[in-house]
Amino acid sequence: MAELNDETDGVAARVSQVAAPVTALGPGRRLGVWFQGCTLACPGCMSRHTWEPTGGRELTTGRFAGLWRDALAGGVDGLTVSGGEPLEQPAALAGLLAAADRVRRSAGVEADLLVYTGWELADALADPAAAAALARADAVVTGRYLAGRPTDLVWRGSANQRIVPLSALGERRYAPYLERRTERPDLQVRVSDGELRIIGVPRPGDLGRIERELRERGVTVRETTWRP
Ligand code: SF4
């Protein structure tokens, strides 16, 4: 198979956000990439700003490879791709994960590649483009967000969502977490350009509570991404 060239090859991804370190979506410290565009429209989605496919910005394979190389040099343990719906850009996801795989191999770092998707795994594997896109993923978190089925499983928003290891590294790294539960999920709060972003999987009521606490501290919240 031909190797992707960092600088010239691959389909650029449309992304909403890139951030590191991410500590609330997978084990250890991670580089996070949020794809832009999602047609699944789960009621109660906290990321409505990622639905519009023409929003966000372009992330080329070459730019991503540089960010990932720097992140690995800085000691991250893995990559988390979320969204939006990554499988709605299968060629871009395939290119990004191929670059991530090649860079981690050349760096000699055992960093895992995790993808969040609203699709069920069987549907993804039955779709040639989606299956090809996930070929290098070590694990996936699958399934729509169902607001009526809250869960205390780590890194999942509803009880139907599953972590599925797809490689030997994925098995090793995610086996301890498949059924792990937590009383309170980790949430990260990042502020940039007047925007406050919450990274992680909040429980029902968490976002409203954060909004109320911000207002009590005098912060004006004009728009949120979790209300229509
Ligand atoms: S929860 Fe995920 S899959 Fe569902 S609408 Fe939101 S971004 Fe899309």
Image (cartoon, grey):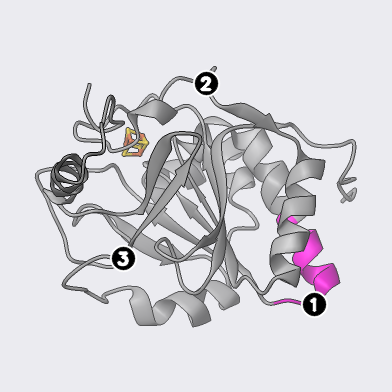
Respond yes or no on whether mark 2 lies under 8 Å from ligand 1. Answer: no
- x and y percentages locating residue 4 in the rendered image: 86, 46
- The earlier-in-sequence mark between 2 and 3 is 2
Mark 2, secondary structure of its residue: loop
Q: Measuring 85% from the left and 69% from the top, which residue is drawn there? A: 106
Judged left or right of residue 151, residue 166 is right
The disc labelled 2 sits on which kind of residue? Answer: Gly
Q: Quadrant of residue 176?
A: bottom left
Q: Measuring 30% from the left and 54% from the top, which residue is drawn there? A: 201
Q: Which residues are magenta?
A: 100-109
Neighbor class of circle 3 (other Cα within 10 Å; few <14, some 14-19, many 20+) is some
Q: Which one is in front, 77 or 88? A: 77
Report the Cα–Cα distance between label 1 and label 3.
29 Å
- x and y percentages locating residue 133 in the rendered image: 62, 44
Query: Which residue matches tag 1?
Result: 108
Q: Nearer the viewer, mark 2 or mark 1?
A: 2
- x and y percentages locating residue 140 in the rendered image: 46, 57
The quarter of the picture where the C terminus appears is top left
Judged left or right of residue 163, residue 109 is right
Q: Taking the image as drawn, is residue 101 in sight?
A: no
Q: Which one is in front, 205 or 110? A: 205
Neighbor class of circle 2 (other Cα within 10 Å; few <14, some 14-19, many 20+) is some
Respond yes or no on whether mark 3 lies under 8 Å from ligand 1. Answer: no
Report the Cα–Cα distance between label 2 and label 1.
35 Å
Report the Cα–Cα distance between label 2 and label 3.
27 Å
Residue 186: image tag: 3
Q: Is residue 109 above or below residue 65?
A: below
Q: Measuring 22% from the left and 74% from the top, which residue is drawn there? A: 181
Residue 55: image tag: 2
